[in-house]
Image: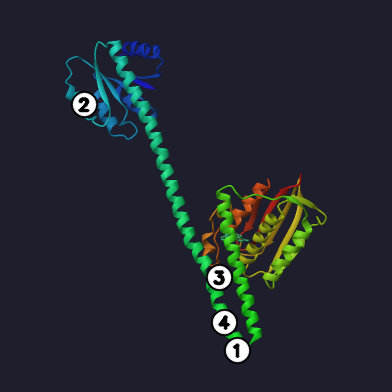
Amino acid sequence: MILIVDDKSENIYSLKQLLESKKFEVDTALSGEEALKKVLKNDYALLILDVQMPGMDGFEVAENMAGHSKSKDIPIIFLSAVNTDKTFITRGYESGAIDYVTKPVDPDVLLLKVKTFIRLYEQNRKLSSVQKSLLEEIEFRKEAERKKDEFISIASHELKTPLTSVKAYTQLLERSLKNNTLDLSNTYLKKSKIQLTKLENLIADLLDISKIESGELKLTKDHFKLESLLCSVIDIIKQTHEGVEIEREGDLLNLTIFADEIRIEQVIINYLTNAIKYSPEAQKIILKTSLEGEALKVTIQDFGIGIPKEKINNIFQKFYRVEESSLRFQGLGIGLYICSEIIRQHNGAVGVNSQLGKGSSFYFTLPLN
Ligand code: ADP
């Protein structure tokens, strides 16, 4: 939009007619003060500014505009008497583009200048929008790079911990074998196996992440009985986590579902191991199945540390870990992200309800048809 500033309404009228006949959008102001107010409020591509006005003259308007970030770059065409000194015209407005047209205005000259300024304005606008999105892209990439570096450092640490344990247990195993203490050897073997499983799971999660990134996490769906999957998962957890009590609620005993059994097992195991990990003081976990409309809902409730309300929306994001508990509990912050991707590929949904200090209920749904 172009703002015409002149104290004489008849001048404004003829300029407005001229510009509108060429499809320019036009606004008007009858004084320098009014122009300044409008310039700070609205967006203009160009000002056509009469130099001689009572009160604030054209130069003063330009000087004032130069002092505001919103208006300092708006181009100005001064309408001046023939004898106005050119250096005077540029006074105080070095940063903006300016030009002048002498009165009486030659419509062709004015239109030519208006077109040039408007074209420049459009180009500048496009450039700054490209620049803005480039800067946003750079920031986004920087942040992604930072997260990746942080992840690599955590991942290396997480991989090293079980590896160091296995190394220590094999040394102890060697010694106990030499001493013929079979009981001890068995204990060390069992302990190294637990650490090796941890390592195996970590690597499997890392591989899953790269599969998700490259769109290669493929499902192999088949029909299977929900209850036998749940029984086998509960068995696995009980074997690997002594003392944990898993209560089974809900009765969909005969339900057959069509899904990727191994991936669904992975999600349930992930929810259950998190429930155990983040409940250091509570052994009880409830595994509940229910029907929600046309979908199966599996909920795993724990009575552990819970999640702060303001963090709950981030919990399924890649690499996200709740800061308050991240030092106390080991982890990579990718398990829940993988779960959400698996469930998303089944057209289901994931979610969590939680109360800080009281516990959490993680759930997923699977459409049944
Ligand atoms: P990890 O456990 O390896 O950090 P996850 O992706 O499984 O990664 O979980 C992401 C974060 O969600 C965890 O770091 C933890 O802060 C939080 N979280 C997950 N499960 C629970 C739970 N049952 N109770 C409380 N917080 C949880």
Q: Position of residue 181 (x, y in %)?
A: 63, 87
Tag on residue 172? 4
Q: Position of residue 35 (x, y in %)?
A: 33, 24
The reply to whether dot 3 and dot 4 touch (C-beta < 8 Å) is: no
Q: Residues within 10 Å of mark 3 (few under 14, many from 20)?
A: many
The residue pinned by badge 2 equals: 90
Q: Quadrant of the N terminus?
A: top left
Secondary element at tag 4: helix
Query: Mark 2 or mark 1, which has the lower sequence index?
Result: 2
Residue kind at label 2, given as amino acid type: Thr
Quarter of the rendering containing residue 270: bottom right
How far apart marks 2 and 4 lie (CA) works out to 87 Å
The residue pinned by badge 3 equals: 162
Residue kind at label 1, given as amino acid type: Asn
Query: Mark 4 or mark 1, which has the lower sequence index?
Result: 4
Q: Residues within 10 Å of mark 2 (few under 14, many from 20)?
A: some
Residue kind at label 3, given as amino acid type: Pro
Q: Toward the viewer: 22 or 164?
A: 164
Secondary element at tag 2: loop
Query: Mark 1 or mark 3, which has the lower sequence index?
Result: 3
Residue at the far right: name it: 254
- Disc 1, ligand 1: is the CB inside 8 Å? no
Tag in front: 1 or 3: 1
Q: Quadrant of the C terminus?
A: top right
Query: Mark 2 or mark 4, which has the lower sequence index?
Result: 2
The residue pinned by badge 1 equals: 179
The image shows a total of numbered marks equal to 4
Tag in front: 3 or 2: 3
Does 133 sit above or below residue 10? below
Secondary element at tag 3: helix
Q: Toward the viewer: 216 or 228?
A: 216
Query: Mark 3 or mark 2, which has the lower sequence index?
Result: 2
